[in-house]
Amino acid sequence: MENRVQTSLIALRRILRATELNARTLARATGLTTPQFIVLSIVAESDEISPKGIAARAGVGQATATSLLDKLEARGLVKRTRGEIDRRVVWVTATDAGRETLDTAPDALQEVFASQFHRLQDWEQAMIVAVLEKVGSMLNAGTIDASPMLDVGAVDRKQ
Amino acid sequence: MENRVQTSLIALRRILRATELNARTLARATGLTTPQFIVLSIVAESDEISPKGIAARAGVGQATATSLLDKLEARGLVKRTRGEIDRRVVWVTATDAGRETLDTAPDALQEVFASQFHRLQDWEQAMIVAVLEKVGSMLNAGTIDASPMLDVGAVDRKQ
DNA sequence: GTCAAAAAATTCGCTTATCGAATAATAATT
DNA sequence: AATTATTATTCGATAAGCGAATTTTTTGAC
């Protein structure tokens, strides 16, 4: 039914809003701006990533990524290293200070989710995991092959 | 298991990323910037809303909301009207042009989701609806009592 | 009723984000 | 060897965003 699609999308938007607000809160807690925080998170998640990759994952242009990295590097939260095999690329890694910053940031969303999650029955938890993964792949699968006219490059290249 | 929480959060982030990229794409398709698009959507969803409410829902400051509204109003996509009972507040509504803009915007995410969704079995669809709503309320429940410093009122008041 | 406090929107000044185009360096292709 | 691609960066210009101050209006206290 069309209704279910509608309901799902509304629920999705609600989830989206909650996570967005959380990102802002987190960013403030760390003294970073939201985009800076997002970039730092991406860098910390991957042990080595290029500015191009960061741009793709953060959904911003390469120029923007460079500018954000400049600020993070100036604060000593990330480090840039020229690639040795391919000297065009720059490898970005999180410094200890960078990881520290992320670790000490209290992730309200995560905590809230975890606490609520633990209240659920086992089968409910399993159901949530399954559905979230399913929806994630649905959305991602779609983005890739359904809209080639849009700049999907960024989405494609995400590893 | 802590693992399930982790897995869920990763899946959530993936969903988030997809929807974020979609928002940017949509914004470009309409000739608006992403924040402008978001604000216009919020306005169109509610038949009447104040700048303060918009700010809360969009997760930005009041000053920012005003500035975004200025631009939307200049393009004739929204209209401001002084409140009659309380003349401090301004009621913002979407104009026909504003609704038109949103309607004609091809919502890639929505289409992709819908097409994937329809392939599923009935029980799977039902499960997705249930889980997404559950997760939404879990996250929002948290947001409300975990961070009262944010004006979460708007989230409550959403119809 | 008047005066002070609160509330809503706006303005202002300043910083950050963001993009596109141009540039520089390196790699790949021919 | 020369051309083309790729990667990052710089540059210039616009938009987003914040906090503080301002304006208008309402509410509360006395």
Image: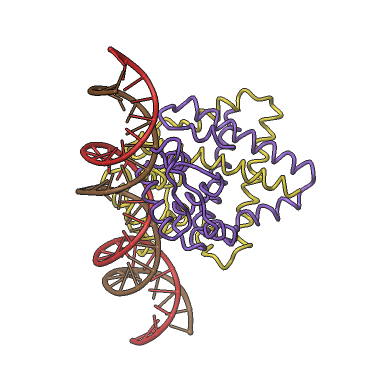
Chain colours: A yellow, B purple, C brown, D red
Q: Position of residue A116 (x, y in %)?
A: 58, 26
Q: Is residue A150 above or below residue A55?
A: below
In this rendered view, identify the residue nearer to me: D17 or A98: D17
Q: Position of residue B61 (x, y in %)?
A: 37, 41
In this rendered view, identify the residue nearer to me: B151 or B7: B151
Camera sees residue A45 = yes
Q: Position of residue B48 (x, y in %)?
A: 52, 43
Q: Residue furthest right?
A: B122
In this rendered view, identify the residue nearer to me: A20 or A60: A20
User: Left of B22 or right of it: where is C23?
Assistant: left
**Image-quadrant location for residue A60:** bottom left
Give me the residue at 27% from left, 44% from top.
A75
Q: Is residue A152 above or below residue B90?
A: below
User: Left of B143 or right of it: where is A36?
Assistant: left
Give me the residue at 50% from left, 49% from top.
B93
Q: Is residue C12 above or below residue A23?
A: below
In this rendered view, identify the residue nearer to me: A139 or B76: B76
Q: Is residue D8 above or below residue A18?
A: below
Count of residue discs: 0
**Image-quadrant location for residue A156:** bottom right
Q: Position of residue D4 (x, y in %)?
A: 43, 80
Camera sees residue A159 = no
